[in-house]
Amino acid sequence: MAFSTLVSVLAIREILLVRLEQEIEKYLTQEVNEFRRLTQGKNPSTAQPFGDDVAAIFDVFLSRNIPHENSFLITLLSGKFYKSSPQALPIGLQPNSALIKDWQKLKQLKQGKEFISNHTIYYMAEPILKGKTQGVFVVTYSSSSAHQQVNQAVVVIIQVTIVVLAIASVLAWVVAGRLLAPLSLLIETAHLITESDLSRRIPVQGVDQIAELSITFNEMLDRLQTAFASQRNFINDASHELRTPITIIRGHLELLGDDPQERRETVELVTDELDRMSRFVDDLLLLAKAEQPNFLNLQTVDISLLIGELYTKATALAQRDWRLENKGVGLIVADRQRLTQAIMNLAQNATQYTSDGDVIALGSEVLNGYAYFWVRDTGVGIAPTDQERIFERFARGSHSYRRSEGAGLGLSIVRAIATAHGGRVELKSKLGKGSTFTLIIPLDPPFGDSV
């Protein structure tokens, strides 16, 4: 603001000086034109032409024209100073000055300016020749007073501008402080946030861009808090799931005796626990890969053939009343192995919560650009409070009558596979009446061949 103010003041001063010179030039030109008209007219006193009487022309003009303030009308006759108006002339325009002597020699119109002492003299000299009599009419303007007025005006402008600048600076400081207060609060909040404390939020005030920034920052903190909580729970659950088989293995190995039968039983138990740990680690790796861009290997899959193959594989999982309810007809761009893995996980999950003779049905359908794959069972069902939670890692239904042998990652894997295809998983279930899990996958994935 100070820099722009300084530039503005300098620009105003230059503009005033330029306009002053324009007004001076206009005045000089006007006086010379009036003198020319007089030389071409008649003597108002005698109503006769002036003839060769140059002195009469000068006398009439000086008597009838009052010069402006700071201006002087000077006449030169036959190479000598004749008269002036007013009679008191500044030092630079005295009869014996160099400037007067220069004008006495003029043969044609001359305009210019001379720097004398502490002021500038603007002039316009008009030679006149009547017969053998030669004269020079000069109109001059001393700019010292005008320049002082300009400088005084500039001083006033500077004083007013300083006051305005001071007031504007104070107001700008106050307004900027209020506007930037949320940013200061945002910085303070960011400094206070740690891995153990993500609960702080910025209060949102107003509807401007800073308020929008505060809302966005709070939403980011919400996501971070959710992610950190999920990560913390994941680590706790994973350590718990791994601690149990490790404890079992260590306990049996520490008590291992010399009896061959006991050794064989211990080896079988340890091997089973190691297999369970291996499956657990494989499931964790699969969930980690689901977030990678190369998780899917897309190809064109015949939906009817796929559901038939899945039904055949599922019937070998357990003794149940297996049924194939529907075979959708169409093609889908998907990862055949990942879809198989998801459906088989659902089928395996259904066998764990059903008994011999219970119905487990598989089916598929194509509708409105989507392929639907479902697994329906008549088992124990899932409580409404658990229907969303069971898709989280290590989660199991709290009202299940039997406990799954897995680590609670199967449904998380199913949802990860569906999400990777641009689809989703839907669940419909009632306690005591069974559950239906449905994979809804677009026939053409939104990401095309980039995966």
Image (cartoon, grey):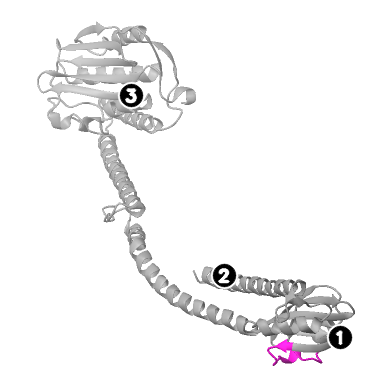
Q: Residue at x 16, y 31 (%)?
A: 386
**Callout 1: SS:** loop
What amino acid is labelled 2 in the image?
A: Val
Tell me residue 384's x, y (percent): 13, 29
Q: Residues within 10 Å of mark 2 (few under 14, many from 20)?
A: few
Number of numbered discs visible in the structure rendering: 3
Mark 1 lies on residue? 79
Tell me residue 179's x, y (percent): 35, 61
For marks 3 and 1, give the one nearer the viewer.
1
Q: Residue at x 37, y 16 (%)?
A: 443
Q: Quadrant of residue 390?
A: top left
Spatial CA span between label 2 and label 3: 63 Å
Q: Which label belongs to residue 423?
A: 3
In terms of depth relative to the viewer, which is nearer, 71 or 209?
A: 71
State the extent of the magenta-drawn residues as a range. 84-97
**Callout 3: SS:** loop
N-terminal of the two: label 2 or label 3? 2
For marks 1 and 2, give the one nearer the viewer.
1
Asked if the magenta segment contains residue 23, the reply would be no
